[in-house]
Image: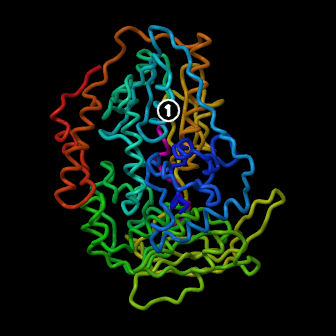
Amino acid sequence: MPYVVTRSCCADASCVLACPVNCIHPAPGEPGFATAEMLYVDPRTCVDCGACTTACPVDALKPHDALGAGELPFLELNASYYKDNPHADRAPMYVVPRQRAVLADGLSVAVVGAGPAGLFAADELLRHPGVRVTVHDRLPTPYGLARAGVAPDHQDTKQVAELFRTIESQPGFRYRLGVEIGTDLTHADLLRAHHAVIYAVGAATDRRLGIEGEDLPGSVSATDFVAWYNGHPDRARDDHRLDTGRAVVVGNGNVSLDVARILTADPDALARTDISDRALAALRGSGIREVVVLGRRGPAQAAFTVPELLALAALEDVDVSVEGWPDDLAPDHDEKTRLLAELAARTPVGGRRRIVLRFLAAPVRIVGEGAVRALEYTPTTLHTDDDGTVRARPTGEIRTLETGLVLRSVGYRARPVPGLPFDEATATVPHEAGRVEPGVYVAGWIKRGPTGFIGTNKTCAQETVASLLDDFAAGRLTPPVAGGTAAPDALGLEAWRAIDRAERAAGAAQGRPRVKFTDAESLRRAATAVPAVTG
């Protein structure tokens, strides 16, 4: 009864460490670790002990005889990895991090950003005795995109919050939530109060299409749309036009598939999740019957991952079809194209909502007067550059899709961090192994761009923290000024726990994991049982 990884896991290596026979790969130190879409269990050497399931923070591992119908393809997916990537040498490859000696008066570090990147950085720091970490965030709640970016129908992925709760419970950890750096405190304030600052602020905005009509009402950033249905305080009061029969999503990454699933999902199923109440009410009245997902290039270049495609293929009450297949692409080119070819061969069922994956289609113009009425696009052909890059070239033919809602989902983009250099081309802070300069560091998307998965932030944080500790050991960090600078009306760990308890209690009363508080007033009110902290 081998165990199986059943989704894009967090890849933080917890299961690798727990496995007594080293049958889960790629492991730390191996090619592909932290960049692979998921980890894989070798069915030939798994001894069915179940240790991996206990260690997994997102409940991604299951015994093969407990798989649901939609999860059965993961059995072959796990096994096929080892056909292409044999692991004859099964000696454990994980190196236990060396603890660093820290001076008796300790090392104080500020982390800006309480998402996965910031919390993994805090965890890496707190592995070393004598370190104190203060994690700041503009919002009254932590966890970043793990709270406000993961789709509500992926509740298993949100279980990574259990790992974050373990991190924030360590001695030496504290929160200062509801504090905006640059407004409530400055970069200079943080440097005075700490030996070092790590910025893990992510990528808060989206990339634009750069086409006419992009600013019409009904043309929306998928980043904002995801934040809306997840109850992010910045977007919770938004309204979106759902009275149209068709929505168009431009871009074909995982976020595009998330948006397409939510727009076509059964509202009664969504009502059992932590989706925003406002979004749920809007989706109950939605007229959308079809979502078209446009990709400039072909199926082989699609940015979504195989696990997310499998989740889409497993939908029982939504038709999924594929259009725009290059003539010279074999349907068994790789696992992704094989799955897409299977979807393309399906026979639609009348009366269902529909998701169309349309490849070789580039947006040209959004049409409308006062609101979106249609999207014009051009078919494309594929051409390979000398360096192997496959590019889409427009044919010039113009086709029209009638729609009242266009969502652009062509990537996240970071904002400049006040006081730090910024590369406009890559939308990242220039650095060397996470070091901007001694005392100032970056981790996560502001460091490497919007790439990777939740677990990618772990190895990213390890590199940054190693640079910081090297600078501390070499005496390159300036000791903090006694007393530091107070953070006004900041919420600490106990305040966040009070919010968490209140949301869970409200959810339990409705048979849901939680009901999120989506505005600053209700969040602060939920935290009032615990006083704000001032230091």
Measured along the vertical axis of the image, is residue 312 above or below residue 27? below
Residue at disc 1, secondary structure: helix
Q: Where's residue 5, x and y in %?
A: 53, 58
Label 1 neighbourhood size at 10 Å, few (<14), some (14-19), many (20+)? many
How many numbered discs sit on the rendered protein? 1
Q: Residue at x 61, y 74 (%)?
A: 339
Query: Residue placed at 37% from the left, 25% from the top?
Result: 185
- Residue 367 to residue 214: above or below: below
x, y (%) of residue 285?
Answer: 26, 75
**Quadrant of the drawing holding the C terminus:** top left
At 58% from the left edge and 35% from the top edge, which residue is drawn? 429
| Above-or-below relation of 286 to 118 | below
Examine the residues drawn in magenta and state their main secondary structure: loop
200 or 317: nearer the viewer: 317
Q: Is residue 103 above or below residue 134?
A: above
Residue 260 percent location from the top left of the image? 45, 70
Q: Is residue 310 left or right of residue 327?
A: left
* Place of residue 47 in the rendered image (x, y in percent of width and height, measured from the top left): 57, 54
Snapshot quadrant of residue 74? bottom right
Lateral position of residue 415 relative to residue 240, left or right:
right
Magenta-colored span:
200-212
Amino acid beneath label 1: Ala
Q: Where is mark 1, residue-wise?
A: 121
Residue 31 falls within the magenta-colored stretch? no
